[in-house]
Image: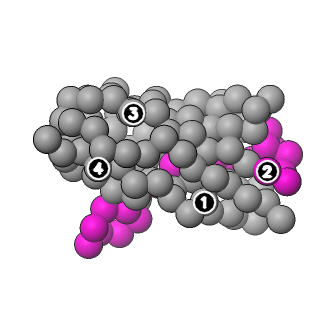
Amino acid sequence: QVQLVESGGGLVQPGGSLTLSCTGSDMIFSLYRMAWYRQAPGKEREQVARIGSGDDTYYADSVKGRFTISRDNAKSTMYLQMTSLNPEDTAVYYCYAFWAIDYWGKGTLVTVSS
């Protein structure tokens, strides 16, 4: 059974940085298209960034230039480097993987507050 586990969330001040990790198990990680989604309180889940098996990337306009998505297939891990964080980035961040079937992690909470 494929499992995705996020880590790295927490409380950070506005303007700060944080790096999230998502580690997959029981999967050939390199085959999967991976993405980060987030869901803020009272809002729908939205895609933040995605990275293909060929390392092609996409970013939502709201995070372009501030967030960087990357993957290390040898470690079965995807990352999201987040900089210049603001309160609007507060959300539960979810890891997503797709290869014929999609899988979700349970999420990690990021709170941006002074």
Q: CA distance from mark 2 to mark 4?
A: 27 Å
- Colouring chosen for the image of the structure: one colour
User: What span is colored magenta in the figure?
Assistant: 25-45
Which mark is first along the chain, 1 or 4?
1
Q: Residue at x 60, y 60 (%)?
A: 105
Q: Residues within 10 Å of mark 3 (few under 14, many from 20)?
A: some
Q: Secondary structure at mark 4?
A: strand
Which mark is first along the chain, 3 or 1?
3
Q: Residues within 10 Å of mark 1 (few under 14, many from 20)?
A: some
Q: Residue at x 26, y 29 (%)?
A: 16
Specify whether residue 23 is painted magenta. Answer: no
Left or right: 98, with 9 as reference point: right
Write down the residue under mark 1: 105
Q: Amino acid at mark 2?
A: Ser
Specify whether residue 33 is painted magenta. Answer: yes
Q: Amino acid at mark 1?
A: Gly
